[in-house]
Image (spheres, rainbow, N blue to C red):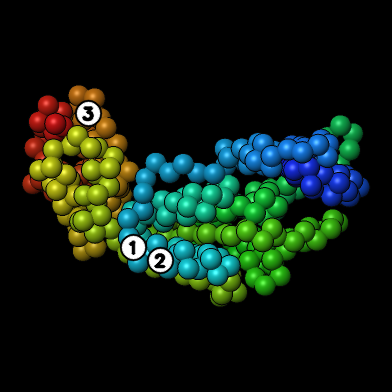
Amino acid sequence: MDNKKIGIASDHAGYQLKEFVIGYLDSKGYDVYDFGTNSEESCDYPDYAHPLAEALRPRIPAPAFVYYGREVWEQALAALLCGENLLLAGGKATGKNVLAENLAAAFGRPAWDISFHVNMDAASLIGMDTFEGGQVKFRPGPVYRCAQSGGFGVLDEINMAKNEALAVLHAVLDFRRAIDVPGYERIPLAEETRFIATMNYGYAGTRELNEALTSRFVVIQMPTITEENLEKLLRTQFPDLNSKYVRQFALLFLDLQKKCDSAEISTKALDLRGMLDALRLMRRGVAAGAALDMGITNKAFDSYEQGLIRDAIAARIPAQLTAAKLFD
């Protein structure tokens, strides 16, 4: 199979073995990137292992947000250490993708983010044949690359895709841990490879996952974020935010959550990203009311619903509040 890429490195003691492995991989059609050493002369292993590790570093996440929730962390870490694949199921703003990114960073593994949609097919996941330079070549998909590299594959909103497109993942996710591409060799997954799927039943276009696929994951039902953890998040993102308003913004989010739970408003307003965006706008001089309209309220397109959202906001945050009063 063409354009399979592998990096390899050794110290002087492993030089002969490295050369043998490179020859074998070349014979199997791999593109081998040799990071050294290039002789049996005494050398230090880190001088060659470090550049190899650095080649994968761009795919190792550097999370902008921290997931707060000790119990969920403990469950997720235990599952991954046991070699399981993980399904994070929960409503909007429960931190599913944040946790997935945090887990890849905690394990120091390269990550592939794969966003599922209704037109997703097997070739989009595994790869497909392409015509290049007068030859048919296999172009690996993200699941294939992740499996080869021992990475973490984040299968985002997995229940957006049709079940027939997901069937190709069965052998990847179960005890076989392999990718079978028709016309090519069977590829075993690297031992470190893990898959973390996320799903939200509340979005339009989502569907029930079939039992065969669900059985290949252990499942964590993601809890809603607590007031304490909201305040931690706000303090981390905005260290200079006045402590009074740290609490008020946390309570505002919980107020909106209650209104969503009671079906007074839609989940469009339950947007933690939008609240953080609004705070960044306020820091730049936009008045609180206008910033929260841009970050939250205007995402609901019904005027009556917008009024309900503005009422909830006004109970916590004055519309004319300025950066001088918000930030210390």
- The reply to whether callout 2 and callout 1 are in contact (CB within 8 Å) is yes
First reached walking from the N terminus: tag 3 or tag 1: 1
Quarter holding the C terminus is: top left
Mark 1 — residue?
70
Q: Residue at x 74, y 61 (%)?
A: 188
Q: Position of residue 221 (x, y in %)?
A: 39, 68
Q: Which mark is residue 74?
A: 2
Relative side of 298 to 113, left or right: left
Above/below status of 121 relative to 284: below
Check disc 3 and give the amino acid type: Arg
How crowded pointer 3 is (Cα within 10 Å; few <14, some 14-19, many 20+) is rated as some
Residue 201 seen by the camera: no
Q: Which mark is residue 283?
A: 3
Is label 3 in a helix, a strand or a loop? Answer: helix
Q: Residue at x 9, y 31 (%)?
A: 325
Check disc 2 and give the amino acid type: Glu
Is label 2 in a helix, a strand or a loop? Answer: helix
First reached walking from the N terminus: tag 2 or tag 3: 2
Q: Position of residue 308 (x, y in %)?
A: 16, 49
Q: Residue at x 78, y 42 (%)?
A: 12
Q: Position of residue 205 (x, y in %)?
A: 47, 57
Q: Position of residue 207 (x, y in %)?
A: 49, 64
Above/below status of 208 relative to 36: below
